[in-house]
Amino acid sequence: MKISLPIIKNRHKQLLALIKDGVFKLFLAMGCMVVMAAATSATAFLVKPALDDIFLNKDATMLKIIPLAVIIIYFLRGAGAYGQEYLMNYVGESIIRRLRNNLYDHIMDLPLSFFQKERTGVLMSRITNDVNIIKTMVSNAVTGVLKDFFTIIGLTIVIFYRDWKMALFAFIVLPIAFLPIVKFGRLVRRVSTGCQEAMADMNSFLHETFAGNKIVKAFGMEPYEKKRFAEMTRSLFKIEMKAVMARSISSPVMEFLGGLGIAFVIWYGGRQVIIGDSTPGTFFSFLAAVLMLYDPVKKLSRLNNAIQQGLAASDRVYDIIEKKSNISERENPVTIKTGSHSVIFRNVFFKYDDAMVLKDINLNVGAGEILALVGMSGGGKTSLVNLIPRFHDVSKGAILIDGIDIKEASVSSLRNQIAIVTQEPILFNDTVRNNIAYGNIKTSDKEIENAAKAAYAYDFIQSFPDKFDTTIGELGGRLSGGEKQRICIARALLKDAPILILDEATSSLDAESEMLVQKALENLMKGRTTFVIAHRLSTIGYADRIIVVINGRIVEEGKHEELIALKGEYCKLYQLQFSATDVRNVDELTSASRRIDLG
């Protein structure tokens, strides 16, 4: 993807803006660099008096002064090196910390559609790998450029002071020496982008295969995944070697050009000494300064490579930071107050990209009503309930809570009114206590325990070694499916939101776990406006109303008996689940379902 020049400049300005909090330390670091540059230049400057006064003129006084001066110079150089290293790394680490926080904060604010399109491993790579490359650029490359810049200035002064004519000839080569820096730097930036993209793909692959390792082993796919990973590493190796070639070639080219300049200095300077126009001390002082000068110029090539890699990484980071959320909020949004709520869908249409998922949905759900949504998979049930908390926005029409268009309400106050329990329990690698209190972190221990009891989770939690302080592992991996679901229900109970969304909350459970979870859901649904997405029709007999969603439309609506009597889509779904020889007929199914007394 080609990025326009104004966007690039804006990104670089944003990076520089992050430095403002560390400006004082940055100036101190630059002061230390000036001391280092002065010490390096003084070392070259002392070559003349050391050679002429001590070795040629045999001056005993200078024999005492110059060694002392060298000690002082190297002490100052060491102190300056430590100061600039610490201060520049402090500034660099501070910038990276804030950049990483900004990136994470922005990602968390992006809508659900963003996470459905992006791979988790790629996003992780942006926060870790790409930001680390920027850190190298800020902490090391920028530091080196500044340090070498000051060194070049100091040594240039020494060179021109010693012999300005010879200095002019030496500097003829210098502009030519900078050409590889520019040319190869562009190549490094291009190749570096490819390396970072390949690394992001690898992170994504690792995340998937580690998280899904049970399935990999169950299907005996270890050799297949090993082969895929080997192909990825081979591809990354090829790209890395291109980057190595681009980085490595600039230094030898500069070495050769620098050698041409030094050869000319030796020829011209040696000639001046032979004919008596210069002293050996002046020549060797000049030569030492030139040799020292070409070293930082040569380093600039390597540092430029690091800077180009950092700029490529910053482009990838800002590609995310500059993404705009399509879930916008009004300037002065309405606050939805806590209490029982009615929910109305008015001529709602919704599409993912170009595919229309929901078409002309009209629905009025009263406060405290339990509405069940049934239909074949892919019909649009989950998409419909995901519009209520504004995980997505309607493409056309409106959703109203107590007459308020949810687009007019603040997102935080809207989502405070909604609790969700999904088919796949989402838990975090934290304690049971913190997972239940998630979303209501200021709650008391007593309230957490009461929520656990109401969710029929208290007894199994008490069997854990550390009870509520037990860490449950990544995604709750140490718990059974029923246990995870009951902790999710306890979490929803503790939030005490007036609108509840149950997205196939029992479909993946065995009969015993389902019975316990169903009892917990009974407690959860009391007095709440509830949307229940159900796959098993035997679990929705308690619903006040059932709607059948087929191909994005509501095709039937009513109670269980009414829908069966219609002999339409609901009846077909029922017949798919219950055969003619099933001991339960329609009336028995209804009776069994209504055994769950919601009070």
Image (spheres, rainbow, N blue to C red):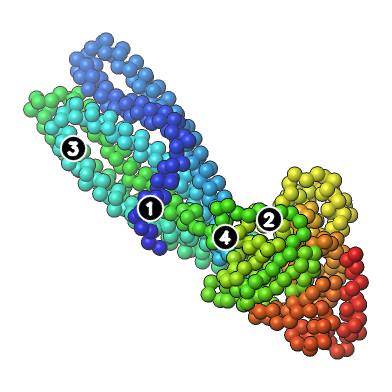
Residue 327: which numbered mark, if any? 4
Label 1 or label 4, whichever lies nearer to me, is 4
Dot 2 lies on which element?
A: loop
Residue 170: which numbered mark, if any? 3
Residue at (23% x, 12% y) in the render? 59
| Mark 1 touches mark 4? (CB < 8 Å) | no
Dot 3 lies on which element?
A: helix
Q: CA distance from mark 4 to mark 3?
A: 62 Å
276 relative to 524 in the view: left or right: left
| Residue ID for mark 1 | 8
Q: CA distance from mark 1 to mark 4?
A: 26 Å
In the displayed structure, would residue 504 be above or below residue 203?
below
In the displayed structure, would residue 136 be above or below residue 461?
above
Residue 336: which numbered mark, if any? 2
Between discs 2 and 1, the one toward the N terminus? 1
Of the pair 238 and 495, the residue shown nearer to us: 495
Q: Amino acid at mark 3?
A: Ala
Q: Amino acid at mark 1?
A: Ile
| Mark 3 touches mark 2? (CB < 8 Å) | no
Dot 4 lies on which element?
A: loop
